[in-house]
Amino acid sequence: MGSDGSAGPAGTLVIFGASGDLTRRKLGPSLYSLHAKGRLPRDLRVLGFARSEMDDGEFRSYLAEAVQEFAPDFDQATWDELAGRLHYVAGDMTESGAYEALGRRLAELDDGAAPRLYYLAVAPRFFEAAVRGLGAAGLADDQEAPRNLVVEKPFGRDLDSARRLNEILYCAFREPQVFRIDHYLGKETAQNLLYLRFANTIFEPVWNRNYVDNVQITVAETVDVGRRAGYYDQAGVLRDMFQNHLLQLFTLVAMEPPAPFNQTTLRDEKVKVLSATRPVAREDVVLGQYEGFLDAEGVAPDSRTPTYAALRLQVDNWRWEGVPFYLRSGKALDAKATTIHIEFKRPPSRLFGAFQSPAPNILSICIQPDEGVHMRFDAKVPDEPSRTAPVDMEFHYGDSFPCVGLPDAYERLLLDALQGDASLFARSDEIENAWRLIDPVVAASEDPASGRPAVYEPGSAGPREAERLPGREGRVWREVCVSHD
Ligand code: BG6
């Protein structure tokens, strides 16, 4: 995976949608932070490209404001060093003339022998025009130097549209040039899943059907759909969260160790897990919609769009046969937390008291907000002849690495893309396999015969109906990790 240090070839980052929200909230602050840490490739130039008329100076002021707002440790002198590397060209990306202007500006900034990274920070409806425009202007041709493309989600809204989007990308780029962003893969704690599993000896031997009883992945959000109601009503939680973020976490937990470790083998192993996952049965899905969703502006009055879903997945392979994976995610819930629980089987005999069944060991990986790892095991209660109680062994990033803040996911992903490392980006076959799993679930949710999603109260733990997924197998949802301060 990507390396640190400012070494790296000079090159140009071209941001499509440079006056947009993503650039302001994420890309600008990430560039600043990477520069402040000395990690930005030396001599990298940034060329903003958008419709708004601005010159370089105005673009610099625009980004400075955004960085001051979103990067807490703003330092004027550090910013001034970076600002000199920022440039701007105005253009309508749906018009071919804009790409000639872009090409001319690029030729002024670099000699063409340097790598270029095109970042599509624009709505999906512009992807096709951007890709075709770059292709027609000869700007995607990577014979002389890398010409890579970053694409933001959504990657289609089902398998067919994802395939079509891939075909569009391939009009001008080849698969190895395409970097599809899933910001969950840039989260430090999601990356740590691989380190936890494969940089330690103690976890991997028990990471299988012989020891694991079930796995639970929860991505809970307190926010409701807010101002994104129009988009969200078309997407729903299955497209917005499951097809990408939850399935990415799932593959990191379930995959085999990639060997040798590189971007190809890592993504091969993730694809293998998705291909080995059984189609989701209707009875393995619970859908919910928070009360009030139908009143949000932009939502159809009779919308059946789920804002909550719980799924039971089953991987048909040697390692996981018979181990259920329960996944759930929703908006307007009682906690903002992403947690993975690996629940182990109970010990085979009850040595300590005939009536007491020991609690299962649970390894909890807290992706956010209180990032860390907890291991729950039973201990003897002091001064009691044979009573046990569950206790926790805990690792918190904040305690173990007090001087190192967790970087924003975009920082890591942007740096990796600049360095041409695609390990933390989704490959086309990952995307297509994820849709293959999610499409039938979406279709069932849209089928009038299958009933409306269960209504749940905002600020609750979601619909009660979700309890039946683990419940009918004698299991329960485990609590998510919430911040301890
Ligand atoms: C986005 C979804 O991809 O991820 C949003 O579109 C969601 O609906 C967000 O709120 C969650 O990301 P995070 O990093 O806040 O957990």
Image (cartoon, helix red, strand yellow):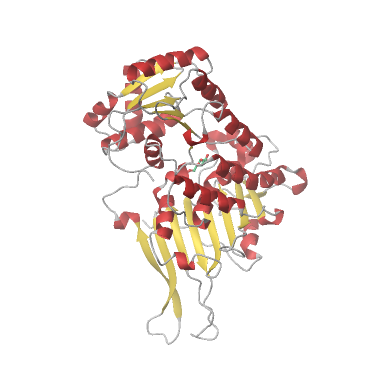
Residue that extends furthest to the front in the rendered view of this protein? 143
The quadrant of the picture occupied by the C terminus is bottom left
Where residue 55 sits: x, y (%)? 35, 15
Q: Which residue is more in the foreground, 221 or 34?
A: 34
* 380 relative to 267 in the view: left or right: left
Where residue 272 sits: x, y (%)? 57, 52
Where residue 244 sits: x, y (%)? 54, 44
Looking at the image, which residue is at 60% across and 48% down?
308
Looking at the image, which residue is at 33% across and 19% down?
109
341 up-or-down from 37: above or below: below
Looking at the image, which residue is at 38% across and 85% down?
383
* 59 relative to 134 in the view: left or right: left
Q: Looking at the image, can residue 349 be seen?
A: yes
80 up-or-down from 242: above or below: above
Where residue 298 sits: x, y (%)? 61, 31
Residue that extends furthest to the left in the rendered view of this protein? 77
* 304 relative to 361 in the view: left or right: right
Residue that extends furthest to the top in the rendered view of this protein? 97
Task: Give the quarter of the image for residue 473.
Answer: bottom right
Q: Which residue is more in the foreground, 265 or 297?
A: 265
Q: Looking at the image, can residue 334 be seen?
A: no
* 389 relative to 110 in the view: left or right: right
33 up-or-down from 192: above or below: above
The number of numbered badges drawn on the structure is 0
Looking at the image, which residue is at 54% across and 24% down?
126
Q: Which residue is more in the foreground, 422 or 17?
A: 422
